[in-house]
């Protein structure tokens, strides 16, 4: 069995344990089949109650990145794919979820320094007006697909010179390999 298949169920369990305080009591079991776990698809959606904020590419602290995600792709705002930023150690790259009452799919494809160590999800909006209209909201979400801890870890390791990337790495690993970057 490839190492990825051995690690993913453990990481998923750790991730779900990190959400334990926000997941509703009647949450679906945190189990997946081996093949579903490898693909990230859940047998049942995972409900959670999370804090959300909003951002746009024209904010002062985002100008240097333009309208790009942490992956270098264009931030998206469509019903089929709505970009969001999160702490990848909590909501790994590629995690897909729906917000109760909204008919769109939100996808984690970005991260932000202020999100590290929180369960806050930052939702992208193309204008400041829409960003301000969203403000800060506590919402019920249903996670329909768990993203890739492996892909998240790989990207964060390449950016480990940044303290916030090291912090995300540290909370998604059980060994201390990341400490070599703590300079």
Image: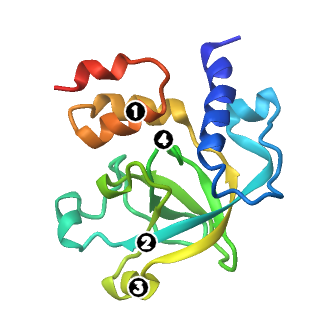
Disc 3 designates what residue?
Answer: 130
Say which label, 2 or 4, has the lower sequence index: 2
Q: CA distance from mark 2 to mark 4?
A: 18 Å
The residue pinned by badge 4 equals 89
Discs 1, 4 touching: Cβ within 8 Å: yes
Q: Are there few (<14), some (14-19), or many (20+) residues within 10 Å of tag 2?
A: some
Labels 4 and 3: the sequence-earlier one: 4
Tell me the SS state at disc 2.
strand
Label 4 sits on a secondary structure element that is: loop
Q: Marks 3 and 2: which is nearer the front? A: 2
Foreground mark, 4 or 3, reads 4
Labelled disc at residue 119: none
- Quarter holding residue 48: bottom right
**Quadrant of the rendering where the C terminus is positioned:** top left
Residue at the location (38% across, 81% down)?
A: 131
Q: Quadrant of residue 1?
A: top right
Instruction: Give the vertical position of 8 relative to 64 (above or below).
Output: above
The residue where tag 1 is placed is 169
- Where is residue 56 drawn, in percent x and y? 33, 72
* SS for callout 3: helix
- At x 17% / y 71%, what residue is drawn? 60
Circles 3 and 2 in contact, beta carbons < 8 Å: no
Q: First in sequence, mark 1 or 2: give its number.
A: 2
């Amino acid at each position: 069995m490839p190492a990825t298949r051995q690690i993913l169920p453990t990481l998923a369990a750790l991730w779900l344990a990190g959400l334990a305080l926000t997941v509703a009591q009647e949450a679906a079991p945190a189990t997946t089949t081996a093949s579903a776990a490898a693909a990230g698809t859940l047998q049942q959606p995972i409900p959670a109650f999370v804090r959300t904020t909003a951002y746009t590419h024209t904010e002062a602290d985002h100008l240097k990145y333009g309208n790009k995600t942490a992956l270098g792709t264009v931030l998206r705002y469509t019903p089929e794919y709505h970009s969001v930023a999160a702490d990848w150690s909590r909501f790994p790259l590629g995690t897909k979820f729906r917000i109760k009452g909204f008919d769109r799919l939100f996808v984690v494809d970005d991260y932000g320094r202020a999100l590290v160590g929180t369960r806050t999800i930052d939702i992208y909006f193309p204008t400041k007006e829409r960003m301000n209209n969203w403000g800060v909201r506590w919402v019920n979400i249903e996670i329909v697909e768990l993203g890739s801890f492996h892909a998240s870890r790989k990207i964060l390791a390449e950016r480990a010179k940044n303290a916030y990337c090291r912090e995300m790495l540290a909370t998604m690993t059980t060994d201390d390999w990341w400490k070599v970057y703590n300079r």
